[in-house]
Image (tube, rainbow, N blue to C red):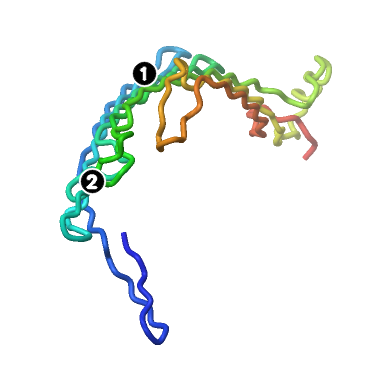
Amino acid sequence: MAYVKALMAGDVQGLNIEAITARGFESDIALAFQHARLSGMVKSGVYQVIAHMDKERYEDDPALNKQLRYTPEWQFKHYVHLRYKSMQLMLSNSYVTERYSSADHSSPFDPLSAYSTWNTAFGIDIPWSGNRPPRPKEVTMATTQTNRKILGQPLWQLRWRVELNNIFSETYEQVLNYPMPGRHFMLSIQLNRVAHENRPFTNK
């Protein structure tokens, strides 16, 4: 971290006032599977971050070698995703260990409590074409004419998704005095245009 010091004659000089050292590791494991029209993935991760100032900003700096503000040392994340035909189901969990709101960990509110949140979502994709289905007579006439080719036909995909976040209404703060929302829902609807493998017959 640095600040800018104004000097005489309008000169500006940047001075480094905090030297920060950070280290840690990440470990992820994932398993994907598929059976017929059912597929899915299971994933877990462990993350560690140790970050602190290793140089005093001033004499007897109490924040020296203390974990940085709002930087949890450990996080654990788990994720499950299932898909069957056009339906999808997701479940995730995140566990975050204690954090500190003050640089020297001296605040009466420190440490901020660890918390665990669970989220889930369900979605379904509905394909839809704006063109009417061909009549049997039209199909017969089209297939008997060899001088016709298949061209592009637009297909629309309607995607519905419902999310339930913080399922157990965990009470926690990522930043001191700014509580995060409890259990809440989210509904999203998307209409996407995609290419269709079936094409209408047109004269060439």
Q: Position of residue 24 (x, y in %)?
A: 20, 41
Specify whether 111 is left or right of 133: left
Which residue is drawn at the image coordinates 25% and 32% (left, top)? 74
In the picture of the structure, the residue carrying the numbered disc 2 is 51
Which residue is drawn at the image coordinates 82% and 17% (left, top)? 135
- Classed neighbour count for the residue bearing mark 1: other residues with Cα under 10 Å, few (<14), some (14–19), many (≥20): few
Q: Quadrant of residue 82?
A: top left
Which residue is drawn at the image coordinates 33% and 34% (left, top)? 109
Mark 1 secondary-structure assignment = strand
Which kind of residue does numbered mark 2 sit on?
Ala
Q: Quadrant of residue 193?
A: top right
Q: Closest to the observer: 135 or 103?
A: 103
Q: Residue furthest front?
A: 108
Q: Position of residue 53 (x, y in %)?
A: 21, 52
Q: Nearer the viewer, mark 2 or mark 1?
A: 2
**What quarter of the picture does the N terminus occupy?**
bottom left
In the picture of the structure, the residue carrying the numbered disc 1 is 33
